[in-house]
Amino acid sequence: MHHTYILKCADDTLYVGCTNNIEKRLNEHNHAKSGAHYTKIRRPVVLVYSEAYRTLAKARAREAELKRMTRVEKIALIVA
């Protein structure tokens, strides 16, 4: 299973990503020395939204859609 997700960073920004292990990836965003520079300098991050997909291709396609959305659209999706 693959997940597309949205994180809320300590500076109140949103980060969109994709992974096949959401728990491991969240731990990496919050603790790893390597990985996404964007979240590394905005810790801690909190998972606020996720969707599951059977294939990596579908998860990546949805990730791209989410990244094109405005902040307002992402927040509306999170609170829905």
Image (cartoon, grey):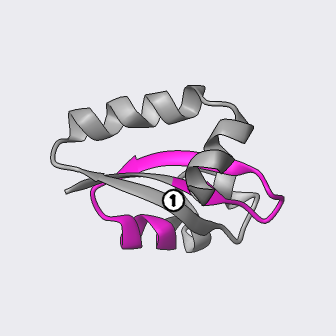
Locate residue 64, reporting x and y percent: 45, 29
* Above or below, 30 relative to 63: below
**As drawn, 4 above or below 69:** below
Q: Residue at x 67, y 60 (%)?
A: 8
Picture coordinates of residue 23, whole percent (x, y) = 39, 73
The quadrant the C terminus occupies is bottom right
Q: Tell me the quadrant of the picture where the N terminus can be found.
A: bottom left
- The residue most toward the left is 54
The residue stretch that appears in magenta? 6-27
Q: Nearer the viewer, residue 33 or 55?
A: 55
Say which residue appears at 72% left-offset and 60% top-offset. Answer: 9
Q: How many marks?
A: 1
Q: Badge 1: how crowded within 10 Å, few (<14), some, or many (20+)? A: some
Q: Which residue is mark 1?
A: 49
| Front residue of this view, candidates 26 and 72 | 72
- 17 within the magenta span: yes
Amino acid type shown at disc 1: Tyr
Q: Residue furthest front?
A: 80
Taking the spot 70% from the left edge, 72% from the top edge, the residue there is: 44
| Residue plotted at (65% across, 37% down) | 73
Q: Is residue 18 left or right of residue 7?
A: left
Residue 26 is one of the magenta-drawn residues? yes
The answer to which quarter of the image holds residue 22 is bottom left
Quadrant for residue 30, please give it.
bottom right
